[in-house]
Image: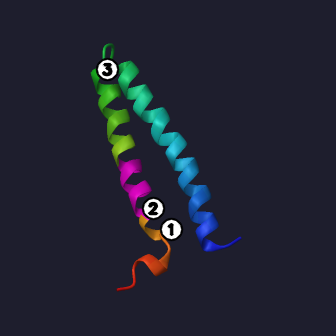
């Protein structure tokens, strides 16, 4: 399995977890603000990781001048 395939599969797993955390934060917003904030924080950290993975999985031919 190539590096790009590994990055894409990891990206899909993190994307699914990110969506779960965002939904959890939304559902908890009315009942428990602390847990909602915790879920939002974890989602933001995952979002940063997803952006890094998206950058790494770009085709190198797009980066040449």
* Of pointers 2 and 3, the one earlier in the residue sequence: 3
Residue 37 vs 14, above or below: the answer is above
* 17 magenta-colored: no
Residue at 42% in and 66% down: 55
* Outermost top residue: 31
The image's mark for residue 54 is: 2
Residue located beneath label 1 in the image: 57
Disc 1 secondary structure class: loop
Residue 53 appears at what percent x and percent y?
46, 62
Marks 2 and 3 in Cβ contact (< 8 Å): no
Residue 34 vs 9, above or below: the answer is above
Marks 1 and 2 in Cβ contact (< 8 Å): yes
The image's mark for residue 29 is: 3
The residue segment tinted magenta is 45-54
Residue at 47% in and 79% down: 60
Image quadrant assignment for residue 3: bottom right
* Outermost right residue: 1
In front of the other: 63 or 23:
63
Residue 65 appears at what percent x and percent y?
34, 86
Q: Residues within 10 Å of mark 1 (few under 14, many from 20)?
A: some
Marks 1 and 3 in Cβ contact (< 8 Å): no
Residue at 34% in and 45% down: 44
* Of pointers 1 and 3, the one earlier in the residue sequence: 3
Residue 54 appears at what percent x and percent y?
45, 61
Disc 3 secondary structure class: loop
């Amino acid at each position: 399995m190539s590096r790009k395939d590994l990055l894409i599969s990891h990206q899909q797993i993190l994307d699914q977890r990110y969506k779960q955390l965002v939904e959890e934060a939304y559902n908890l917003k009315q009942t428990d603000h602390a847990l909602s904030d915790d879920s939002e924080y974890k989602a933001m950290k995952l979002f940063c990781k997803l952006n890094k993975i998206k950058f790494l999985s770009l085709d190198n031919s797009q980066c040449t001048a």
